Amino acid sequence: MRFDHCSLRDCGIARFLSLLDGPWATLIVRDLLKGPRRFNELLDGLPGISAHTLTSRLRKFEAHELLTRTAYSEIPPRVVYELTPLGQSLRPVLNSMNEWALSVPDSTFDN
């Protein structure tokens, strides 16, 4: 596999990063891989993320068809986020990232 410079359209890594940019993106997907989640469940599961950032990422994922947003007309209103099959297809990617990172010696992270 070659990783020469290429356009966004032709480079899988660039395409991946354009959809899952920033440190929160993959963590949001990680949490949604566990199953459907409500907004506050996601917010609580990601200490340090702001509601604004979470909302922005969820909207982007919905626009790119990585997840669905289902709003139930109840009182109080309930909104549930769930990965689409396209979003679910990220599971092996995140599993590989996890396995690789856990294989890196702890001393690599010591400063």
Image: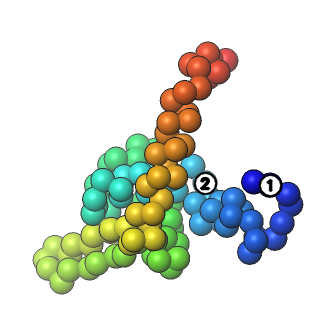
Nearer-the-camera pick, 66 or 60: 66
Secondary structure of residue under mark 2: loop
Residue 1 visible in the snapshot: yes
Q: Is residue 44 left or right of residue 108?
A: left
Tag 2: Cα neighbours inside 10 Å, few (<14), some, or many (≥20)? few
Does label 2 or label 1 sit earlier along the sequence? 1
Q: Which residue is the extreme one toward the left?
A: 75
Tag 1: Cα neighbours inside 10 Å, few (<14), some, or many (≥20)? few
Q: Quadrant of the N terminus?
A: bottom right
Instruction: Identify the residue shown where x is 59% and y is 66%.
Output: 19
Q: Which residue is mark 1?
A: 2
Q: Which residue is the extreme one toward the front?
A: 1
Instruction: Identify the residue shown where x is 49% and y is 49%.
Output: 94
Q: Is residue 51 left or right of residue 36?
A: right
Nearer-the-camera pick, 15 or 44: 15
Q: Which residue is mark 2?
A: 22
Q: Quadrant of the C terminus?
A: top right
Instruction: Identify the residue shown where x is 27% and y is 63%.
Output: 36
Front: mark 2 or 1 = 1
Instruction: Identify the residue shown where x is 34% and y is 76%.
Output: 69
Q: Is residue 25 above or below residue 84?
A: above
> Label 2 is placed on what type of residue?
Gly
Secondary structure of residue under mark 1: loop
Nearer-the-camera pick, 92 or 38: 92
Mark 2–mark 1 Cα distance, whole angstroms, equals: 24 Å
